[in-house]
Amino acid sequence: MTRLLVLGLLDMQPMSGYDVQQMLKLTDAERWGGVLIGSIYHALKKMETERLVEVASIEQTGHRQKAVYQITEKGKNHLKELARDALKASSVIYPSTLYSGLSYVHKLPKDEALTALSLQTDALDREYQTLEKGLKAKKEALDGDLPAMTKLVFENMFAIICQQQYFVSKAMQLLNS
């Protein structure tokens, strides 16, 4: 996922490692994409070795220098492969930890189970709020001109959270009945 996102950003414009990190932070890629923001410099160096990216320029910032990377033709071809593979890969992820816990919920006193599920509900609410903040930041960064595909992705992420909230609510109702 890291390679796909980094190459995709560099395909839009040349960037320094710091700029790539900031863009990924802005889009909250660490949370939804599993990208470790701290691994970006390592990924860039590895992709440079593989000739997927190259240093376009060295910029002076105060007493430091920073490399600005650009995607190569080989990198553009690899980006297409990664995008194609990502679209083909199954993206269904089940909340297996929650399912496992519910399988043995009868081992807990009802009030403990309900408290735990209430914490799950709180976590889902925080996730929804974080996603709303991310959407707002993305809209601001793009001057309100959110691409249709980005809108669709956010709609799906909101729907997944809502479905999970509904599921936990139904589980709590079952425990209460």
Image (cartoon, rainbow, N blue to C red):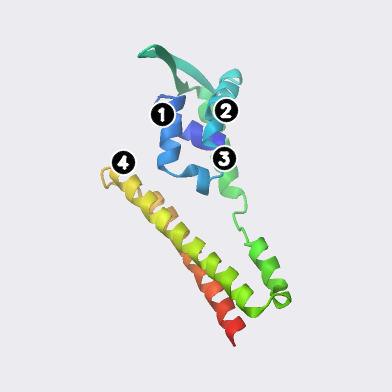
Whether residue 114 sits left or right of residue 99 in the image: it is left
Residue at the disc numbered 4: 141
Is residue 6 among the parts visible in the rendering? yes
- Spatial CA span between label 3 and label 2: 11 Å
Closer to the chain start, of discs 1 and 3, is: 3
Circle 1 SS class: helix
Circle 4 SS class: helix
Q: Which quarter of the image is occupied by the C terminus?
A: bottom right
- Spatial CA span between label 1 and label 3: 18 Å
Given the image, on which type of amino acid does mark 1 rest? Asp
- Is residue 176 depicted above or below 61 in this figure? below
Question: Residue at 39% across / 27% down in the picture?
Answer: 13
Tell me the quarter of the picture where residue 82 sits. Answer: top right
Given the image, on which type of amino acid does mark 4 rest? Ala
Residue at the disc numbered 1: 19
Closer to the chain start, of discs 4 and 2, is: 2
Residue at the disc numbered 3: 1
Closer to the chain start, of discs 3 and 2, is: 3
Q: Which mark is residue 131?
A: none
Please tell me which residue lies in front, 83 or 27. 27
Please tell me which residue lies in front, 20 or 147. 20
Judged from this view, the residue extending furthest toward the bottom is 177
Q: Residues within 10 Å of mark 2 (few under 14, many from 20)?
A: some
Q: Residues within 10 Å of mark 1 (few under 14, many from 20)?
A: few
- Spatial CA span between label 4 and label 1: 14 Å
Residue 92: x and y in percent read 60, 58
Q: Residues within 10 Å of mark 3 (few under 14, many from 20)?
A: few
Residue 108: x and y in percent read 70, 75
Residue at the disc numbered 2: 43
Residue 137: x and y in percent read 34, 46
